[in-house]
Amino acid sequence: MKNGVVIVGAGHGGVQAAASLREEGYDGPLILLGDEPEALPYHKPPLSKTFIKDPQAKPQPLRGEAFYTGSAIDYRPGTRVERIDLAGRKLELAGGAALPFDRLVLATGSRPRALPLPGTELAGVLSLRTLGDARLIRDLIATAREVVVLGGGFIGLEIAATLTAAGCKVTVIEAMGRLLGRAVAPAVAAHVRQRLEALGVRILTGTTVSKLEGDAGGHVAAAVTSDGERLPAQMVIVGVGVVPATELAEAAGIQTANGVRVDAQMRSSVPEVLAVGDAVNYRHWFTGQDVRLESVQNATDQAKLAARTILGHEEPYAAVPWFWSDIGDMKLQMVGLTAGGNREIVVGEPAENRFSVYHYLGDRLLGIESVNRPADHMMGRKMMGAGFSPAPDLIASGGDLKAALATFQEKAE
């Protein structure tokens, strides 16, 4: 490949795609484009936790500088792609330069969903997606005594716990009837709410905001709920979900539908263009449904497979999905996709902040949600990776899952 591989997006998926190409033996030209100005690609999960809490915290690089130079990866930060020219096999960059490619990997990720609300243009109204966003939030903590978080999903709750620990008075507003409505079981959501309220977080569910008010200087001063309550706020965090960054693909005529559509090998509707991560929609091997997953695990596993596809391998994507979130003193770990289940089994002690919820459809294990029970999570990943569904009664009775898995694997062999 004379022009080599170009990767658009320097997040977890893009960096992993570059690393995997080299690990798999690709020795051609390899260019990694990032639109942020940061010197090195960085870990994003800590931004909502340790980074905004600690004024001295620095971003955690995904890989050291020596990795890029030693692996002959041409990393170009602060580079924005304007257009994909499929006919000419090149990218048109901001400023007018052109960059040819033989294979293109889109790892463009997602961006915060905009909220059509009067006042979102005010200073102090922020979303968290990038290091720049996290720096702004961290800078405002010193003067923001009261904070309103719009959205009761993972990001919003992580930030709420972090800002409360930093001394802010935090109110979370969620339009749905409960927190984490599309993410976890009601038992887990109720537990998270109870722990956050014990920390001092005020939580309003089934509530929306009608407008944000500003002061004379153009800085946010309050959020007004749909029922008229005025909540003073010197900072408002908008965390109402994300949308896939598919504009480049759409403009180029690449098929999209809630993400770039890819096959089991991560190829888009244009075979020379592959896509990975938050911006990808694919038919999931376990559920048989079209899904778009927003997780570091999904991005990195898809990137590994995309690299192998570029090098001529044809195995399908079959990674077990798993996720995590740290909210205050709760480590939430999830494995599998639990939508459509009809039975839940709770094990452990919610009162001790340590329990798991096993989700079943009939006798088929769909997934496990754990709060401070990492052993359950790890066993769940092993069982689902092996295709093993323990009998629900075995879970309920506290049976030996390790032995049951070993027996299953012996029989399979």
Image (tube, helix red, strand yellow):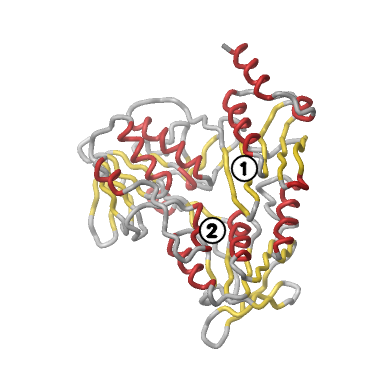
Residue at left offset 68%, top offset 76%? 231
SS under mark 2? helix
Left/right placement of residue 357 relative to residue 49 reads right
Which quadrant of the figure contains the C terminus? top right
Tell me where residue 248 appears, x and y as whole percent.
39, 52
Count of marks, rendered view: 2
Question: Which mark, by number, is residue 80?
Answer: none
Tell me where residue 383 appears, x and y as whole percent.
62, 26
Res 336 seen here: no
Res 111 seen here: yes
SS under mark 1? strand
State the residue in front, 147 or 343.
Answer: 147
Residue at left offset 74%, top offset 51%? 191
Q: Label 2 crowding class (10 Å Cα cut-off): few <14, some 14-19, many 20+? A: many
Q: Residue furthest left?
A: 2
345 lies above or below 44: above
Q: Residue furthest bottom?
A: 216
Tell me where residue 222 appears, x and y as whole percent.
63, 78
The residue tagged 1 is 333
198 lies above or below 305: below
Residue 233 image-quadrant placement:
bottom right
Q: Label 1 crowding class (10 Å Cα cut-off): few <14, some 14-19, many 20+? A: many
Tell me where residue 39 appears, x and y as whole percent.
32, 57
The residue tagged 2 is 48
At label 2, the amino acid type is Ser
At label 1, the amino acid type is Gln
Residue 410 image-quadrant placement:
top right
Left/right placement of residue 152 relative to residue 5 reads right
State the residue in front, 166 or 62.
Answer: 166
State the residue in front, 36 or 99.
Answer: 36
Q: Earlier in the sequence, mark 1 or mark 2?
A: 2
